[in-house]
Amino acid sequence: MLGTDQKSESGEQLVQVEIYNQTYSIRSDGDNSYILGLAEYVDQKMREIASGTMTVDSLKVAILASLHIADELHRMNSNHAQSDAQLASRSAECTELLDRVIKHRDIAPQEFEVEQ
C-alpha cells in the first residue's frame, strides 16, 4: 500500500493505494488509515483468489474477489439480523418478567425477599 496523500481545496484527501499491482488514487474526507486498510483487504482477497485459480485476468480476479467479499458481508448482515432478533426477544422476556415482579410486589413481598 502506498499511503501517500494530498489535501484538496475542499478538504478531501487524495490517498494513493496499490491493489493487485495497480495504483489507484482515492478521494476521501475520512481517515487515511481506514482507506489503506480497505485497499489492503481487497488486495489480499484478490491474491487469495488468484492463487486458488489459474486465471491471470485481473478483471476476473477482481470480480471473484468482489463476490467473495459480498458473500462475507451478506453472511455478517444475516448473523447481525439474527442477533438483533434474539436480543429483542430476550429484552421482551426480561421486560415482561420485570413487569410481573413490579405488579405483584405489593401482593406478596415476602416471596421476593432475599434470605440471609
Image (cartoon, rainbow, N blue to C red):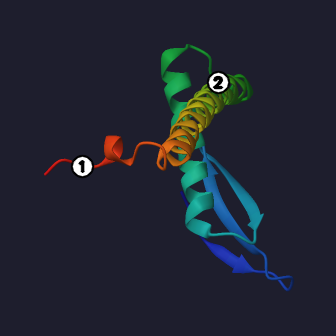
The residue located at (18%, 47%) in the rendering is: 115
What residue type is disc 1 on? Val
Residue found at the far bottom of this picture: 9
The residue located at (60%, 50%) in the rendering is: 39
Please tell me which of labels 1 and 2 falls first in the chain.
2
- The answer to whether the residues at label 1 and label 2 have Cβ atoms under 8 Å apart is no
Residue found at the far top of this picture: 54
Between the C-alphas of marks 1 and 2, the distance is: 51 Å
> Where residue 40 appears, x then y in whole percent?
54, 48
Task: Report which residue position mark 1 lands on.
Answer: 114
What residue type is disc 2 on? Asp
Residue in the foreground of this view, choosing between 33 and 77: 77
Q: In the rendered image of this protein, does residue 34 appear above or below residue 102? A: below
> Where residue 17 appears, x then y in whole percent?
63, 57
> Where residue 24 appears, x then y in whole percent?
71, 55
Labels 1, 2: front one: 1
Q: Secondary structure at mark 2?
A: helix
Residue found at the far right of this picture: 10
Residue in the foreground of this view, choosing between 107 and 61: 107
Residue in the foreground of this view, choosing between 82 and 51: 82
Residue 63 - label: none
> Where residue 3 appears, x then y in whole percent?
57, 66
Q: Can see residue 76? A: yes
Residue found at the far front of this picture: 107
Q: Secondary structure at mark 1?
A: loop
Task: Report which residue position mark 2 lands on.
Answer: 71
The residue located at (62%, 69%) in the rendering is: 31
Residue in the foreground of this view, choosing between 36 and 51: 36
